[in-house]
Image (cartoon, rainbow, N blue to C red):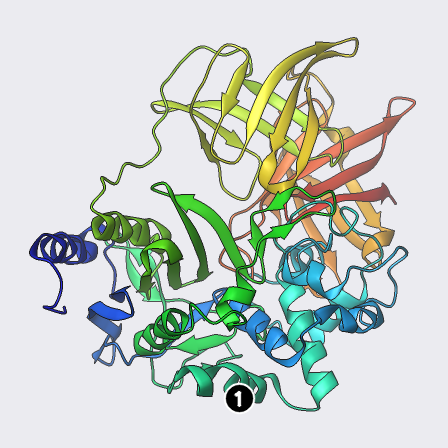
Amino acid sequence: MSDSFSAPLAARLEAAVSALPARFPGPGGAVAVLKDGEVLVRHGWGYANVERRIPFTPSTLFRMCSITKQFTCGTLLDLYDDPSELDADVDARLPQLDEPSPGMLHLAHNQSGLRDYWAVAMLHGAPIEGYFGDREARRVIDGTRTLQFQPGTSYSYVNQNFRLISDILQDRTGRSFAELLQTSIFNPVGMERAILAAETRAMPDGTVGYEGTVESGFRPAINNIWWTGDAGLGASLDDMIAWERFIDETRDAPNSLYRRLTVPVAFSDGQPAPYGFGLQRTKMFGRDVTMHGGALRGWRSHRLHVASERLSVVVMFNHMSAAQVASAQILAAALGVPYEPERSTQQPTALYGTYLERETGLSARIEPAPGGAKLRYLMVPELLEGISATRVEAGSVVVNAQETAEGAEAVMERPGENRTSILARCDETPGEDITELAGVYRCEELDEAEVTIELAGGVVYGGFSGILGDGRMEMLQRLAKDVWVLPCPRALDHTAPGDWTLAFERQGGSVTAVRVGCWLARDLMYQRV
């Protein structure tokens, strides 16, 4: 740690950094804190590879995963003052799309309306730890026929937005994306060890990412995805320190790269958007923050920057601990404010129950949880606070009860997505004949991908099949009449789709179709074969 800052700040950071290995146990990690362009903390601990006893140091190469997205957008802005001149290139890469294509800025701001290709890959039967390279990516992306929403109107996290950007930049320039990163970002910034580490199976210096816990033991994580502009950056802590220093050194330049990356972004209706150019915009401890995390099996990272304080934090773990939480704790220590995670209180509410979102067919469950309640709708549950009889909320969502002529419903508002939707309460009364669900259902939208529903010893199972193979069979969970979920806790990417909603539809009392979706890939209709 630097000795050129105040004793109270030094003591706070020393305590916070020293606590990280115990709070977030695993093979190794690294952390950096910068203030006013000066490095206050530059620290690594543990091992980059426990089998080979390679220490985790500030020069260790790390898989930065989705933190790559800001560098992809930085390369785009370095090469093109107006990215929209590449809009026709986006259209050319979606040959089967039956509606207007998103533009380049829609991709960069996660407003494209595309369904996430790693989620769609699971519907095509991709094996969880199977190979997924350029050919597989092209097959999934080229098959796009419809969008989840009109580009620019809403937000959804879509990894291939940034793969498309890097692929288009390669085609336009005739140079590899690795070379473009080197000339547009790494060389000017001074990121001396940074590379495009497209193959996720291994890092060139032997660094390994690990799955597991202290209780179960840690084992090397198996990954077989090939990444480009979506998540392919390999960088050391020293490389990320160079990036944060570059941001500070160029902060007053009117056309600096990070200033361009962090300009305010809006949806098509003028409402402010919380994500743009590969960076999340948010508030933490009353300050405006730009940030992004990265994750793959065995790898977690997070970086954030508080421009008003000229303050940056970078955290890396070669295991599955929550780097975002760690970075928030370090930021609190640097600011001298208490770190208080969200807490909710248990209160009665009429909103507990199972719902179906009318617009998307996704299930939404509001359930009691220790100390409060949770909403199961996204990939992971959201902790709710501010619970009352007719209202629950979290930082990103508000749900209000309402009664209509059609029965009990709720209105869900998600400001960060610029979206309001109707949740229809489901009939949770048991009684339907589960044998009626068994069969094969086919999705024309996905090149005739199929979902197979079978009864195995009286228990309902389901599995997806498509251009990438036959996926594993999973036991379905009944939520309500004709509403089930197929669990998907592990997938190609770290953040799996979670639960796929299967909403069966009937005509004349007979099951004829099933509406399938998750937040990453919504509203896909499968007809019974």
Relative to 276, residue 383 above or below: above
* Percent coordinates x, y for residue 46 in the rendering: 19, 69
Q: Residues within 10 Å of mark 1 (few under 14, many from 20)?
A: some
* Percent coordinates x, y for residue 249 in the rendering: 37, 74
- In which quadrant is the C terminus drawn? top right
The residue where tag 1 is placed is 183
Identify which residue is drawn at 35% across, 52% down.
Answer: 322
Identify which residue is drawn at 57% across, 19% down.
Answer: 353
Identify which residue is drawn at 37% across, 24% down.
Answer: 344
Question: Which image quarter: residue 96?
Answer: bottom right
* Percent coordinates x, y for residue 151 in the rendering: 76, 52
Q: Which amino acid type is shown beneath numbered disc 1? A: Thr
Question: Which image quarter: residue 171?
Answer: bottom right
Q: Nearer the viewer, residue 296 or 450?
A: 296
Q: Is residue 462 visible?
A: yes
* Percent coordinates x, y for residue 400 in the rendering: 59, 18
Q: Nearer the viewer, residue 211 or 62?
A: 62
Left or right? Give the position of 301 relative to 433: left
Question: Which image quarter: residue 527?
Answer: top right
Identify which residue is drawn at 55% across, 57% down.
Answer: 491
Q: Is residue 470 visible?
A: no
- In which quadrant is the N terminus drawn? bottom left
